[in-house]
Image: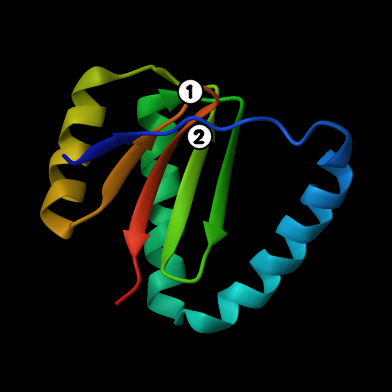
Amino acid sequence: MQEKELNYTTAGGFAQGAAINARMRTLAMWSHYDYQQKVQAERMALGLEFAYSARRIFVNPRKNFISIKLENAKVKDRRTLDMLELQYEREGITKVVTDQAIIYRITKQ
């Protein structure tokens, strides 16, 4: 599976504005995806919930991809994770690792 590592900084004093902006962008971006892509993202989030123990899970549509973000994730079931990642690799889904989270990206079709 293709894996990237990113370094992000916190929003600091602008965290509330960043959160509001993220919510508005999420609502607007869902209009660019069809029902089947939304269902695929939700199913992926449910599958990852079995493999990881995460503080929160976010499904976020973006301009070119849908991201499934697992905040402060720790592997709970390695066998399930390996099976899921093998399937995701076949589908062209990428994995991004940051200090804060693990993010899976479904590229827009």
Q: Could you give the CA–CA distance between mark 1 and mark 2, rounded to whole angstroms?
A: 6 Å
Q: Are marks 1 and 2 in contact (CB under 8 Å)?
A: yes
**Camera-side residue of 18 and 72:** 18
The residue labelled by disc 2 is 70
Q: Is residue 34 above or below residue 50?
A: below
Q: Position of residue 21 (x, y in %)?
A: 78, 59
Classify residue 57 as left or right of residue 27: left
Please report the residue visible at 37 percent of the width from the left and 63 percent of the height from the top: 40
Q: Residues within 10 Å of mark 1 (few under 14, many from 20)?
A: some
Q: Nearer the viewer, residue 97 or 106?
A: 97
Residue 43, given in percent of the width and then of the height, sits at 40, 54
Q: How is the image coloured?
A: rainbow
In the displayed structure, 33 sits above or below 67; it is below
Q: Is residue 84 left or right of residue 38?
A: left
Q: Residue 55: which quarter of the image?
A: top right
Image-quadrant location for residue 57: top right
Residue shown at the point (49%, 30%) measured from the top left: 7
**Which mark identifies residue 6?**
none
Q: Quadrant of the C terminus?
A: bottom left
| Residue hosting label 1 | 73
Instruction: Compare residues 23 and 51 and report the one nearer the observer.
Output: 23
Q: Is residue 17 left or right of residue 64?
A: right
Residue at 50% across, 34% down: 70
- Decide if residue 68 is on the left or right side of residue 18: left
Where in the figure is residue 63, as x and y percent of width and height? 49, 71
Which type of secondary structure does the marked residue at label 1 adopt?
loop
Tally of numbered discs:
2
Q: Which residue type does callout 2 highlight? A: Leu
The three-letter amino acid code for the residue at tag 1 is Ala
Q: Residue 65 or 17: which is nearer the viewer?
A: 17
